[in-house]
Amino acid sequence: MLNFFGSIYRLFRRAALGPRSWIGFGLYAAVLGLEFLGVWISVQMISWTKVFYDALEQFDVSEAIAQLSVFAGLVGLWAAAALFGQWIRDKLLLFWRERLTDAALRSWLGKAAYWHLRPGLSPAAVDNPDQRIAEDCRNFIRLLLVVSIDVITNVVALVSYVAILWNLSGFALEFELLGWDVTIPRYMVWLAFLYVAGSTLITHLLGKPLKGLVFRQERREADFRHALVQVRDNATEIAQSRGENAERKRLDRRFVAIKNNWNRLIGREFILGLFTKPYYRSILRIPLFFALPAYFAKAVTFGGLMQLASAFSSVATTLSWFIFNYRDLAEIAAVAQRLDDLFANTADPEPMPGVPRAIRRKQSTDAGMSVAGLRLHTPDGTALTPVPDIRIEAGERIWVSGPSGAGKTTLLSALTGLWPYGEGSIDGPRDGLVALPQVPRVFNESLAAAICYPSDPAEVSDARLHEVLNLVGLPHCRDRLGLEGSEAVQGLSMGERQRLAIARLLIHKPSFALLDEATSALDLQAETELFALLKKELPNTTLLCVAHRPPKALAPYRTWAIGHRDRIERKSA
């Protein structure tokens, strides 16, 4: 229970406190004010009930008609308060959701947590962070508003309703039990609390497993969506491999997990509903039965009986909030745990236990780099082949060679400061370093965004974009620069994407560039032309290239051999 409230409090602080917090609290106060107006209207309706039914009992037509006008006025006022209250609540939901989402994005993207918390790199890997940020932030704020406003409103309403019921219950319930005369003054008040307390206990016992089931259902749904996205992103490979049946089996397994947990979830909700549904339907009628002894004892009139039943129903309904909202409470507990875990894990990504993290990093004063005593480890602790020491001078070109699986890509991750597992020292630049992966990222926003990433494309002129497209052999893509959305990058081959990545280097002109199989999809002639282009356009850039074949167009270069024998040798043109 303490963990639950702790999670709620921490998430609430992120959403509500900070700059411009007064806007959110102002909206919250406005919603509460309109909710309190609704409570006042409900109190007036209780009084109206006695007057109206007394008029019916006495066949007072004029009074009954007058009370219909009162009823219409109260209903109109309630509808207006409810409508404006919902509009303000929706505004507040968006305001606090935006702040919580901003905090989640800063935490996830900060310190490269999105990279460190991938499965296999950390024992605290975060599953489906996209769902947690996109959906859980929205659901948490929605449920927080529902629960908190209802709790505050119901506390105020309960005080009002209990006061009314106390005043109306001036009579006592008298009966004999085992030879003893028992008198319970104002029995309707005590009966309301006992009735709801027993019902709440039953509800909690029946619904306790819901939190875990809701938590797992959210994960299963997110896993299924992620599997569908993978099919879309790898459509060409799947189609060429005739992998539809394999993908269908994989998707079916994901959906079976959804179905199995869903059946357990609805089974538990059915069990809970066996009690809550009859309770919900009977709570407006049971009070009438409880008040019949007072009516038959002629302690109240018929109008008084209806007023007493209405007051009892109001008290019981308010006290029954926990019963009626148990599903929402289970959901907010699951959502809060998922979001709180996201913030906790991204704040300080937990490393793999027992794996050395002793890589010393120092910023160099130029565009050169020094590596000494470097030995990298996999996340499970397996030591990779030691990396030969090297001093790379500014403007030098290095070919990193080695067999597959030797750890070349891991080495590049270490050089960029990402890979944490290993020991040794790396002195290199922090600014002006650009890394190009084997599969460059393109965006559905525009072709210019793909070329200029991570900079703003508005900072680069169209003339410069046209120029670099011509240089990298993509003149036919110039017409796409004006397109927006997926149409701009749709149909680009892997080779064309790698040419776009080279164009990105020409735009940024970094002082140090790491190329990880950045031309693997190109033929030898195209690769030679692009490497010659880099030599011409970026003569002062330090180039470190991972490739399976020697980049002869980059000559003169040195070879940094990884994984077979420690050697660094000079190559000539």
Image (cartoon, helix red, strand yellow):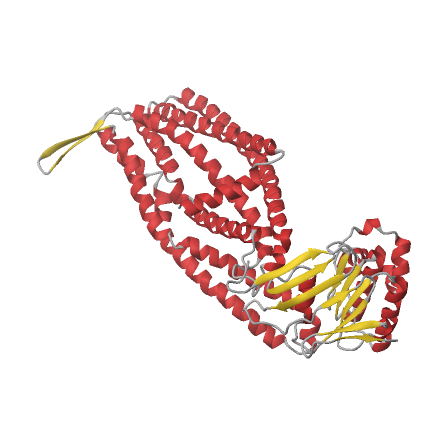
123 vs 428, left or right, is left
Q: Position of residue 209 (x, y in %)?
A: 39, 55
**Res 483 visible:** no
Given residues 13 and 527, the one toward you in this image is 527
Q: In the current view of this chain or complex, which residue is farthest to the left?
A: 179
> Which of the 4 quarters of the picture holds residue 103?
top right
> Which of the 4 quarters of the picture holds residue 131?
bottom right
Q: Give the answer, above or below, for where 44 lies relative to 510.
A: above
- What residue is at 58 percent from the left and 37 percent from the top? 92
Q: Position of residue 503 (x, y in %)?
A: 83, 62
Q: Position of residue 332 (x, y in %)?
A: 48, 47
**Res 210 visible:** yes
- What residue is at 63 percent from the left and 48 percent from the top? 106
Given residues 419 and 328, the one toward you in this image is 419
Given residues 173 and 490, the one toward you in this image is 490
Q: Position of residue 47 (x, y in %)?
A: 39, 24
525 vs 191, left or right, is right
Q: Give the answer, above or below, for where 171 lies relative to 400.
A: above
- What residue is at 33 percent from the left and 25 percent from the top? 57
